[in-house]
Image (cartoon, rainbow, N blue to C red):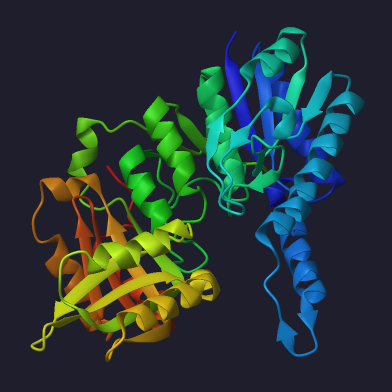
Amino acid sequence: MGLIVQKFGGTSVADAVRIHRAARKAIDAKERGNQVVVVVSAMGDTTDDLIDLAKQVCTVGDREIAPPKREMDQLLVTGEQVTIALFAMAICAQGHQAISFTGGQIGLLTDESFSKARIQSINKQKIFKELDAGKIVIVAGFQGVTSDGDYTTLGRGGSNATLVAVGAVLKADVCENYTDVDGIYTADPRIVKNARKIEKISYDEMLELSGLGASVLQTRAVEFAKKYNVPLHVRNSQNDNEGTWIVAETQNMEHIVVSGAALKKDLTRVTVKAVPDRPGIAARIFHSIAAANISVDDIIQNVMDDNTANISFTVEHGDLHDIKPIVEKLVKEFGGTTAAIYQGELAKVSVVGVGMRVHTGVAERMFDALAKAKVNIQNITTSEIKISCIIDKDHGPIALQAVHDAFDLGKARA
Protein backbone atom coordinates (compact mmCIF):
# COMPACT_ATOMS: atom_id res chain seq x y z
CA MET A 1 0.00 0.00 0.00
CA GLY A 2 1.31 3.45 -0.98
CA LEU A 3 0.34 6.94 0.07
CA ILE A 4 -0.64 9.41 -2.65
CA VAL A 5 -1.39 13.10 -2.25
CA GLN A 6 -3.37 14.56 -5.14
CA LYS A 7 -4.13 18.21 -5.82
CA PHE A 8 -6.85 19.59 -8.08
CA GLY A 9 -6.72 23.21 -9.23
CA GLY A 10 -9.63 25.56 -9.73
CA THR A 11 -10.45 24.59 -13.32
CA SER A 12 -10.43 20.90 -12.34
CA VAL A 13 -13.19 21.49 -9.76
CA ALA A 14 -15.03 24.32 -11.54
CA ASP A 15 -18.46 22.64 -11.47
CA ALA A 16 -20.27 19.55 -10.19
CA VAL A 17 -19.35 17.43 -13.23
CA ARG A 18 -15.64 18.18 -12.86
CA ILE A 19 -15.74 17.65 -9.11
CA HIS A 20 -17.21 14.17 -9.69
CA ARG A 21 -14.54 13.45 -12.33
CA ALA A 22 -11.77 14.51 -9.96
CA ALA A 23 -13.34 12.51 -7.13
CA ARG A 24 -13.26 9.46 -9.39
CA LYS A 25 -9.49 9.81 -9.77
CA ALA A 26 -9.09 9.84 -6.00
CA ILE A 27 -11.33 6.79 -5.69
CA ASP A 28 -9.41 4.95 -8.43
CA ALA A 29 -6.17 5.57 -6.56
CA LYS A 30 -7.70 4.20 -3.36
CA GLU A 31 -9.08 1.14 -5.14
CA ARG A 32 -5.53 0.38 -6.33
CA GLY A 33 -4.64 -0.10 -2.67
CA ASN A 34 -3.35 3.36 -1.77
CA GLN A 35 -4.15 5.73 1.04
CA VAL A 36 -5.25 9.00 -0.57
CA VAL A 37 -5.19 12.63 0.52
CA VAL A 38 -6.64 15.27 -1.80
CA VAL A 39 -5.80 18.98 -1.72
CA VAL A 40 -8.22 21.26 -3.56
CA SER A 41 -8.36 24.87 -4.69
CA ALA A 42 -11.38 27.15 -4.87
CA MET A 43 -13.79 26.40 -7.72
CA GLY A 44 -13.08 28.06 -11.06
CA ASP A 45 -12.75 31.84 -10.78
CA THR A 46 -13.99 32.00 -7.19
CA THR A 47 -10.82 33.61 -5.81
CA ASP A 48 -10.78 36.26 -8.55
CA ASP A 49 -14.47 36.96 -7.96
CA LEU A 50 -13.86 37.43 -4.23
CA ILE A 51 -10.96 39.80 -4.94
CA ASP A 52 -13.16 41.84 -7.30
CA LEU A 53 -15.89 41.99 -4.67
CA ALA A 54 -13.39 43.26 -2.10
CA LYS A 55 -12.26 45.97 -4.51
CA GLN A 56 -15.87 47.07 -5.00
CA VAL A 57 -16.45 47.29 -1.25
CA CYS A 58 -13.19 49.22 -0.77
CA THR A 59 -13.93 51.79 -3.46
CA VAL A 60 -15.35 55.03 -2.06
CA GLY A 61 -16.26 57.46 -4.80
CA ASP A 62 -13.24 57.76 -7.07
CA ARG A 63 -10.87 56.49 -4.39
CA GLU A 64 -9.89 52.83 -4.06
CA ILE A 65 -8.62 51.88 -0.60
CA ALA A 66 -6.37 48.84 -0.18
CA PRO A 67 -8.30 46.28 1.92
CA PRO A 68 -6.62 45.13 5.15
CA LYS A 69 -4.62 41.99 4.35
CA ARG A 70 -5.95 40.13 7.38
CA GLU A 71 -9.52 40.71 6.23
CA MET A 72 -8.65 39.69 2.68
CA ASP A 73 -7.40 36.36 4.01
CA GLN A 74 -10.57 35.98 6.08
CA LEU A 75 -12.49 36.40 2.83
CA LEU A 76 -10.37 34.32 0.45
CA VAL A 77 -10.18 31.16 2.58
CA THR A 78 -13.93 30.70 2.10
CA GLY A 79 -13.40 29.60 -1.51
CA GLU A 80 -11.55 26.41 -0.61
CA GLN A 81 -13.93 25.66 2.24
CA VAL A 82 -16.76 25.35 -0.27
CA THR A 83 -14.75 22.99 -2.48
CA ILE A 84 -13.59 20.59 0.25
CA ALA A 85 -17.15 19.94 1.41
CA LEU A 86 -18.48 19.41 -2.12
CA PHE A 87 -15.54 17.14 -2.99
CA ALA A 88 -16.14 14.98 0.09
CA MET A 89 -19.84 14.79 -0.81
CA ALA A 90 -18.97 13.67 -4.34
CA ILE A 91 -16.81 10.83 -3.01
CA CYS A 92 -19.57 9.76 -0.61
CA ALA A 93 -22.12 9.89 -3.45
CA GLN A 94 -19.91 7.43 -5.36
CA GLY A 95 -19.97 4.97 -2.46
CA HIS A 96 -16.74 5.73 -0.59
CA GLN A 97 -15.90 7.35 2.72
CA ALA A 98 -14.36 10.81 2.86
CA ILE A 99 -13.83 13.63 5.32
CA SER A 100 -12.90 17.26 4.65
CA PHE A 101 -10.63 19.55 6.66
CA THR A 102 -9.73 23.22 6.50
CA GLY A 103 -6.10 24.16 6.92
CA GLY A 104 -6.75 25.04 10.54
CA GLN A 105 -8.41 21.72 11.26
CA ILE A 106 -5.25 19.80 10.31
CA GLY A 107 -3.11 22.19 12.33
CA LEU A 108 -1.46 23.78 9.29
CA LEU A 109 0.30 26.59 11.14
CA THR A 110 1.86 29.54 9.33
CA ASP A 111 3.62 32.76 10.21
CA GLU A 112 1.63 36.00 10.33
CA SER A 113 2.48 37.27 6.84
CA PHE A 114 -1.09 37.70 5.62
CA SER A 115 -1.53 37.03 1.87
CA LYS A 116 1.97 35.50 1.64
CA ALA A 117 2.18 33.26 4.70
CA ARG A 118 4.80 30.53 5.02
CA ILE A 119 3.98 27.08 6.40
CA GLN A 120 5.61 26.23 9.72
CA SER A 121 4.07 22.90 10.74
CA ILE A 122 1.25 20.42 10.07
CA ASN A 123 -0.39 18.01 12.52
CA LYS A 124 -0.13 14.72 10.63
CA GLN A 125 -1.78 12.63 13.36
CA LYS A 126 -5.26 13.84 12.50
CA ILE A 127 -4.80 12.96 8.83
CA PHE A 128 -3.36 9.51 9.58
CA LYS A 129 -6.22 8.74 11.96
CA GLU A 130 -8.76 9.21 9.16
CA LEU A 131 -6.63 7.41 6.56
CA ASP A 132 -6.30 4.43 8.88
CA ALA A 133 -10.10 4.44 9.21
CA GLY A 134 -10.29 3.87 5.44
CA LYS A 135 -11.32 7.39 4.43
CA ILE A 136 -10.11 9.65 1.65
CA VAL A 137 -9.01 12.89 3.33
CA ILE A 138 -9.80 16.20 1.62
CA VAL A 139 -7.71 19.22 2.64
CA ALA A 140 -8.24 22.88 1.76
CA GLY A 141 -5.25 24.23 -0.14
CA PHE A 142 -3.93 27.79 -0.08
CA GLN A 143 -4.73 28.39 3.60
CA GLY A 144 -3.55 27.96 7.15
CA VAL A 145 -3.83 29.60 10.55
CA THR A 146 -1.48 31.50 12.81
CA SER A 147 -0.73 30.43 16.36
CA ASP A 148 -3.43 32.93 17.41
CA GLY A 149 -6.02 31.29 15.14
CA ASP A 150 -6.12 33.95 12.41
CA TYR A 151 -6.68 32.67 8.88
CA THR A 152 -3.81 33.16 6.44
CA THR A 153 -3.32 32.47 2.75
CA LEU A 154 -0.14 31.23 1.06
CA GLY A 155 -0.10 33.51 -1.99
CA ARG A 156 -1.08 32.81 -5.58
CA GLY A 157 -0.62 29.12 -6.36
CA GLY A 158 -0.51 28.37 -2.64
CA SER A 159 -2.48 25.15 -3.03
CA ASN A 160 0.66 23.70 -4.63
CA ALA A 161 2.60 24.53 -1.49
CA THR A 162 -0.09 22.78 0.56
CA LEU A 163 0.16 19.73 -1.72
CA VAL A 164 3.90 19.28 -1.25
CA ALA A 165 3.97 20.26 2.43
CA VAL A 166 1.32 17.64 3.20
CA GLY A 167 3.16 15.12 1.04
CA ALA A 168 6.43 15.82 2.84
CA VAL A 169 4.92 15.54 6.32
CA LEU A 170 3.12 12.28 5.45
CA LYS A 171 6.18 10.93 3.56
CA ALA A 172 3.99 10.35 0.51
CA ASP A 173 5.22 8.11 -2.30
CA VAL A 174 4.18 10.73 -4.85
CA CYS A 175 2.39 14.08 -5.10
CA GLU A 176 0.12 14.32 -8.15
CA ASN A 177 -0.65 17.88 -9.26
CA TYR A 178 -3.71 17.78 -11.54
CA THR A 179 -4.17 20.82 -13.77
CA ASP A 180 -5.82 21.70 -17.07
CA VAL A 181 -2.64 20.97 -19.09
CA ASP A 182 -0.79 17.72 -19.79
CA GLY A 183 2.33 18.65 -17.81
CA ILE A 184 5.22 21.11 -17.84
CA TYR A 185 5.97 22.54 -21.28
CA THR A 186 9.15 23.95 -22.78
CA ALA A 187 7.30 27.31 -22.78
CA ASP A 188 3.79 28.58 -22.21
CA PRO A 189 1.77 26.78 -24.93
CA ARG A 190 -0.72 29.66 -25.00
CA ILE A 191 2.08 31.86 -26.38
CA VAL A 192 4.46 29.43 -28.09
CA LYS A 193 2.52 27.18 -30.43
CA ASN A 194 5.28 24.60 -30.87
CA ALA A 195 5.89 24.23 -27.13
CA ARG A 196 6.57 20.60 -26.20
CA LYS A 197 5.69 18.66 -23.07
CA ILE A 198 8.72 17.79 -20.94
CA GLU A 199 8.80 14.20 -19.71
CA LYS A 200 11.17 14.78 -16.79
CA ILE A 201 12.74 17.90 -15.25
CA SER A 202 14.96 18.51 -12.23
CA TYR A 203 13.90 20.32 -9.07
CA ASP A 204 16.45 23.08 -9.73
CA GLU A 205 15.23 23.69 -13.29
CA MET A 206 11.60 23.73 -12.16
CA LEU A 207 12.49 26.06 -9.30
CA GLU A 208 14.00 28.54 -11.74
CA LEU A 209 11.13 28.26 -14.22
CA SER A 210 8.54 28.77 -11.47
CA GLY A 211 10.29 31.92 -10.28
CA LEU A 212 10.61 33.20 -13.84
CA GLY A 213 6.95 33.05 -14.79
CA ALA A 214 5.96 29.41 -15.34
CA SER A 215 2.66 29.41 -13.45
CA VAL A 216 1.98 25.67 -13.17
CA LEU A 217 3.80 25.34 -9.84
CA GLN A 218 4.47 27.85 -7.08
CA THR A 219 8.17 28.31 -6.25
CA ARG A 220 7.73 27.34 -2.60
CA ALA A 221 6.06 24.09 -3.63
CA VAL A 222 9.14 23.11 -5.62
CA GLU A 223 11.40 24.16 -2.73
CA PHE A 224 9.48 21.81 -0.42
CA ALA A 225 9.68 18.99 -2.95
CA LYS A 226 13.43 19.38 -3.37
CA LYS A 227 14.13 19.72 0.36
CA TYR A 228 12.19 16.57 1.25
CA ASN A 229 12.84 14.71 -2.02
CA VAL A 230 9.14 14.33 -2.80
CA PRO A 231 8.50 13.21 -6.41
CA LEU A 232 6.04 15.54 -8.16
CA HIS A 233 3.89 14.41 -11.07
CA VAL A 234 2.11 17.19 -12.99
CA ARG A 235 -0.88 15.74 -14.88
CA ASN A 236 -4.04 16.67 -16.74
CA SER A 237 -7.23 16.15 -14.73
CA GLN A 238 -9.18 15.50 -17.94
CA ASN A 239 -7.29 12.36 -18.97
CA ASP A 240 -5.10 9.54 -17.62
CA ASN A 241 -1.98 10.35 -19.66
CA GLU A 242 1.48 10.40 -18.14
CA GLY A 243 2.45 13.98 -17.28
CA THR A 244 5.78 15.55 -16.28
CA TRP A 245 7.86 14.18 -13.43
CA ILE A 246 9.82 16.64 -11.30
CA VAL A 247 12.64 14.73 -9.64
CA ALA A 248 16.21 14.96 -8.37
CA GLU A 249 18.80 15.80 -11.02
CA THR A 250 20.47 12.97 -12.92
CA GLN A 251 23.69 13.05 -14.92
CA ASN A 252 21.81 12.53 -18.19
CA MET A 253 19.99 15.85 -17.71
CA GLU A 254 23.22 17.77 -18.37
CA HIS A 255 23.17 16.61 -22.00
CA ILE A 256 20.23 18.98 -22.59
CA VAL A 257 21.63 22.53 -22.67
CA VAL A 258 18.29 24.32 -22.20
CA SER A 259 15.20 22.59 -20.85
CA GLY A 260 12.68 25.42 -20.99
CA ALA A 261 11.97 29.09 -21.57
CA ALA A 262 9.73 31.36 -19.52
CA LEU A 263 8.16 34.80 -19.67
CA LYS A 264 7.38 36.85 -16.60
CA LYS A 265 4.94 39.64 -17.40
CA ASP A 266 3.90 42.83 -15.64
CA LEU A 267 7.15 43.87 -14.00
CA THR A 268 8.04 47.34 -12.74
CA ARG A 269 11.58 48.64 -12.35
CA VAL A 270 12.20 50.85 -9.33
CA THR A 271 15.27 53.08 -9.50
CA VAL A 272 16.44 54.99 -6.43
CA LYS A 273 18.72 57.69 -7.83
CA ALA A 274 21.57 59.53 -6.14
CA VAL A 275 21.71 57.56 -2.90
CA PRO A 276 24.85 58.08 -0.79
CA ASP A 277 27.63 55.78 -2.00
CA ARG A 278 28.72 54.33 1.31
CA PRO A 279 28.52 50.98 3.12
CA GLY A 280 25.12 50.02 4.52
CA ILE A 281 22.88 52.01 2.17
CA ALA A 282 21.86 49.03 0.02
CA ALA A 283 21.28 46.96 3.15
CA ARG A 284 19.03 49.69 4.54
CA ILE A 285 16.95 49.85 1.37
CA PHE A 286 16.43 46.13 1.01
CA HIS A 287 15.90 45.54 4.73
CA SER A 288 12.92 47.91 4.60
CA ILE A 289 11.52 46.11 1.55
CA ALA A 290 12.07 42.64 3.02
CA ALA A 291 10.30 43.69 6.23
CA ALA A 292 7.21 44.31 4.11
CA ASN A 293 7.50 40.76 2.67
CA ILE A 294 8.05 42.03 -0.88
CA SER A 295 10.26 40.01 -3.23
CA VAL A 296 12.69 41.80 -5.54
CA ASP A 297 15.10 40.60 -8.19
CA ASP A 298 17.36 41.87 -10.98
CA ILE A 299 19.21 44.29 -8.71
CA ILE A 300 21.69 46.61 -10.42
CA GLN A 301 23.85 49.33 -8.83
CA ASN A 302 25.68 52.01 -10.79
CA VAL A 303 28.23 54.26 -9.06
CA MET A 304 28.25 57.91 -10.19
CA ASP A 305 31.13 60.44 -10.21
CA ASP A 306 29.66 62.54 -7.39
CA ASN A 307 29.94 59.86 -4.66
CA THR A 308 26.35 58.74 -5.17
CA ALA A 309 24.87 55.59 -6.69
CA ASN A 310 21.75 54.57 -8.57
CA ILE A 311 20.15 51.34 -7.34
CA SER A 312 17.58 49.64 -9.59
CA PHE A 313 15.51 46.51 -9.00
CA THR A 314 12.38 44.92 -10.40
CA VAL A 315 9.21 43.89 -8.60
CA GLU A 316 5.94 42.39 -9.76
CA HIS A 317 3.56 45.16 -10.74
CA GLY A 318 1.05 43.95 -8.13
CA ASP A 319 3.55 44.85 -5.39
CA LEU A 320 3.94 48.45 -6.56
CA HIS A 321 1.15 49.71 -4.29
CA ASP A 322 2.96 48.30 -1.23
CA ILE A 323 6.50 49.23 -2.18
CA LYS A 324 5.93 52.87 -3.16
CA PRO A 325 5.40 54.20 0.41
CA ILE A 326 8.54 52.36 1.55
CA VAL A 327 10.70 53.78 -1.23
CA GLU A 328 9.32 57.32 -0.86
CA LYS A 329 10.06 57.22 2.88
CA LEU A 330 13.66 56.18 2.17
CA VAL A 331 14.02 58.96 -0.41
CA LYS A 332 13.04 61.53 2.23
CA GLU A 333 15.43 60.04 4.77
CA PHE A 334 18.37 60.15 2.36
CA GLY A 335 17.56 63.75 1.37
CA GLY A 336 19.69 65.72 -1.06
CA THR A 337 18.99 64.91 -4.71
CA THR A 338 17.81 61.36 -4.02
CA ALA A 339 14.71 60.50 -6.05
CA ALA A 340 12.70 57.47 -7.13
CA ILE A 341 11.64 56.54 -10.65
CA TYR A 342 9.10 53.83 -11.46
CA GLN A 343 9.08 52.24 -14.92
CA GLY A 344 6.31 49.78 -15.68
CA GLU A 345 5.32 47.81 -18.78
CA LEU A 346 8.32 45.51 -18.50
CA ALA A 347 8.74 41.75 -18.84
CA LYS A 348 11.49 39.18 -18.34
CA VAL A 349 12.32 36.42 -20.80
CA SER A 350 14.53 33.57 -19.58
CA VAL A 351 16.04 30.23 -20.54
CA VAL A 352 16.80 27.51 -18.00
CA GLY A 353 18.82 24.30 -18.09
CA VAL A 354 21.25 22.36 -15.89
CA GLY A 355 23.27 21.73 -19.07
CA MET A 356 24.46 25.36 -18.92
CA ARG A 357 26.96 24.26 -16.28
CA VAL A 358 28.97 22.29 -18.85
CA HIS A 359 28.11 23.95 -22.18
CA THR A 360 29.35 27.27 -23.55
CA GLY A 361 27.82 29.81 -25.93
CA VAL A 362 24.35 29.82 -24.38
CA ALA A 363 24.27 33.56 -23.71
CA GLU A 364 25.50 34.43 -27.21
CA ARG A 365 22.85 32.20 -28.75
CA MET A 366 20.07 33.81 -26.71
CA PHE A 367 21.20 37.39 -27.35
CA ASP A 368 21.54 36.70 -31.08
CA ALA A 369 17.99 35.33 -31.20
CA LEU A 370 16.63 38.45 -29.48
CA ALA A 371 18.62 40.70 -31.80
CA LYS A 372 17.22 38.98 -34.89
CA ALA A 373 13.72 39.40 -33.44
CA LYS A 374 14.51 43.13 -32.93
CA VAL A 375 13.96 42.87 -29.17
CA ASN A 376 16.02 45.33 -27.13
CA ILE A 377 17.63 44.01 -23.93
CA GLN A 378 17.49 46.42 -20.99
CA ASN A 379 19.07 44.33 -18.21
CA ILE A 380 20.68 40.90 -18.00
CA THR A 381 20.91 38.57 -14.99
CA THR A 382 22.37 35.09 -14.82
CA SER A 383 22.79 32.16 -12.50
CA GLU A 384 24.48 28.79 -12.92
CA ILE A 385 21.48 27.40 -14.82
CA LYS A 386 19.56 30.44 -16.15
CA ILE A 387 19.88 33.59 -18.24
CA SER A 388 17.24 36.33 -18.00
CA CYS A 389 16.70 39.54 -19.94
CA ILE A 390 14.47 42.48 -19.01
CA ILE A 391 12.59 43.74 -22.08
CA ASP A 392 9.54 45.81 -23.01
CA LYS A 393 6.33 44.02 -22.08
CA ASP A 394 4.98 44.38 -25.63
CA HIS A 395 7.93 42.35 -26.95
CA GLY A 396 7.37 39.49 -24.50
CA PRO A 397 5.59 36.97 -26.77
CA ILE A 398 7.97 37.60 -29.68
CA ALA A 399 10.99 37.23 -27.40
CA LEU A 400 9.72 33.99 -25.85
CA GLN A 401 9.11 32.43 -29.27
CA ALA A 402 12.53 33.58 -30.50
CA VAL A 403 14.56 32.04 -27.67
CA HIS A 404 12.39 28.90 -27.69
CA ASP A 405 13.20 28.37 -31.37
CA ALA A 406 16.87 29.30 -30.95
CA PHE A 407 17.40 26.32 -28.67
CA ASP A 408 15.20 23.96 -30.71
CA LEU A 409 12.95 23.37 -27.72
CA GLY A 410 10.03 22.40 -29.94
CA LYS A 411 11.86 19.33 -31.28
CA ALA A 412 11.41 15.95 -29.61
CA ARG A 413 14.41 14.73 -27.63
CA ALA A 414 16.16 11.55 -28.70
Considering only vertical position in the picture, is 76 above or below 56?
Answer: above
Tell me: 218 left or right of 341: right
Q: Which of the 4 image quadrants contains residue 201?
A: top left
Compared to residue 246, the image places residue 194 above or below, namely below
Residue 19: where, in percent of width, then height? 80, 40
- The location of residue 58, given as percent across then percent down, is 77, 74
Residue found 48% across the figure and 60% down from its top: 292
Q: Is residue 301 above or below residue 229?
A: below
The image quadrant where one finds the C terminus is: top left
Nearest the eye: 26 or 230: 230
Please state which of residues 9 and 68 is positioned toward the viewer in this rendering. 68
Q: Nearer the viewer, residue 43 or 150?
A: 150
Q: In which quadrant is the N terminus drawn?
A: top right
- In the picture as drawn, the residue positioned furthest to the right comes out as 93
Q: Looking at the image, is 233 positioned above or below residue 373?
A: above
Query: Can you give x and y, in whole percent of width and height, for residue 149 in the image?
Result: 72, 37
Residue at the image point whose x is 27% and y is 90% from the top: 336
Q: Residue at x 20, y 50 (%)?
A: 257
- Residue 325 shown left or right of residue 7 in the figure: left
Q: How many labels, in total?
A: 0
Residue 404 visible, this angle: no
Whether residue 86 is visible here, answered yes or no, is: yes
Q: Which residue appears at 41% of the width and 64% of the height?
A: 289
Spot occupied by residue 308 in the image (x, y as percentages of width and height) = 16, 82
Which quadrant holds residue 399?
A: bottom left
